[in-house]
């Protein structure tokens, strides 16, 4: 669990989600509604069956959103999501696929005496272990509170 404060982290530390998450019809419909992205590759089974992935796939940004919920973070150490870099959607996730999350600390940058920024290389994998999404998530963390 990413329950460590900034000054307790080291480059190379790994974090994994505690459980998988199966992508459902409801997930696709709700994300389409919220985002306004009704692309038929996500929402039209007949269209998607004839497309390059052989069926409907999840929105890439839906997967990233799911990852932020699967990431095992602490409400006391983590201040905020700072941003993303180099996100790549390298393999489709179909309805019914189960995804998991893993990350590794790639860089640490102090932001004053009380906070710091951690760059985490992350991967979202499907149930077959195939990397589907990869990138860098930047998290703003508190330093250890004074005793």
Image (cartoon, rainbow, N blue to C red):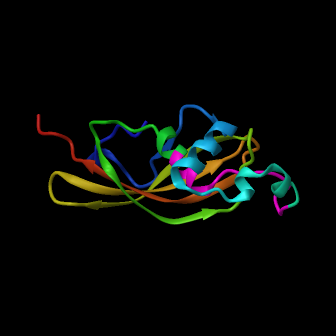
For the point 68% across and 54% down, which residue is it? 131
Quadrant for the N terminus in the image: top left
User: Which quadrant would residue 24 be assigned to in this image?
Assistant: top right
State which region is magenta: 51-65
Q: Residue furthest right?
A: 50
Residue located farthest toward the top when viewing the structure as drawn: 19
Percent x, y of residue 7: 26, 48
72 relative to 47, above or below? above
**x and y, in percent, of residue 91 in the image:** 72, 58
The question of residue 31 being in magenta is answered with: no
60 part of magenta stretch: yes
Count of numbered circles on the image: 0
In the rendering, at what x and y percent does residue 115 appear? 21, 53
Magenta segment main secondary structure = loop
Q: Quadrant of the C terminus?
A: top left
Q: Between 25 and 71, which is closer to the camera in this rendering?
A: 25
In this view, 89 is above or below 94: below
Q: Nearer the viewer, residue 67 or 114?
A: 67
Q: Is residue 103 above or below residue 3?
A: below
Q: Does residue 147 appear to the left or right of 11 in the view shown?
A: left
Q: Residue at x 74, y 57 (%)?
A: 41
> Do we see residue 74 in this rendering?
yes
Residue under the point 83% across and 63% down: 52
Quadrant of residue 59 in the image? Answer: bottom right
Give the side of residue 59 with respect to residue 118, left or right: right
């Amino acid at each position: 669990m990413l329950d460590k404060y900034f000054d307790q982290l080291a480059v190379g530390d790994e974090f994994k989600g505690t459980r998988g998450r199966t992508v459902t019809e409801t997930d696709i419909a709700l994300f389409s509604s919220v985002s306004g992205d009704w692309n038929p590759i996500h929402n039209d089974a007949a269209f998607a069956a004839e497309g390059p992935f052989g069926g409907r796939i999840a929105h890439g940004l839906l997967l990233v959103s799911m990852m932020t919920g699967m990431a095992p973070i602490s409400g006391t150490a983590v201040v905020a999501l700072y941003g993303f870099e180099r996100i790549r959607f390298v393999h489709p996730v179909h309805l019914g696929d189960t995804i998991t999350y893993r990350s590794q600390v790639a860089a640490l940058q102090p932001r004053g005496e009380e906070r710091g920024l951690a760059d985490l290389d992350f991967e979202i994998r499907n149930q077959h272990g195939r990397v589907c999404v990869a990138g860098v998530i930047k998290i703003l963390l508190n330093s250890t509170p004074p005793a």
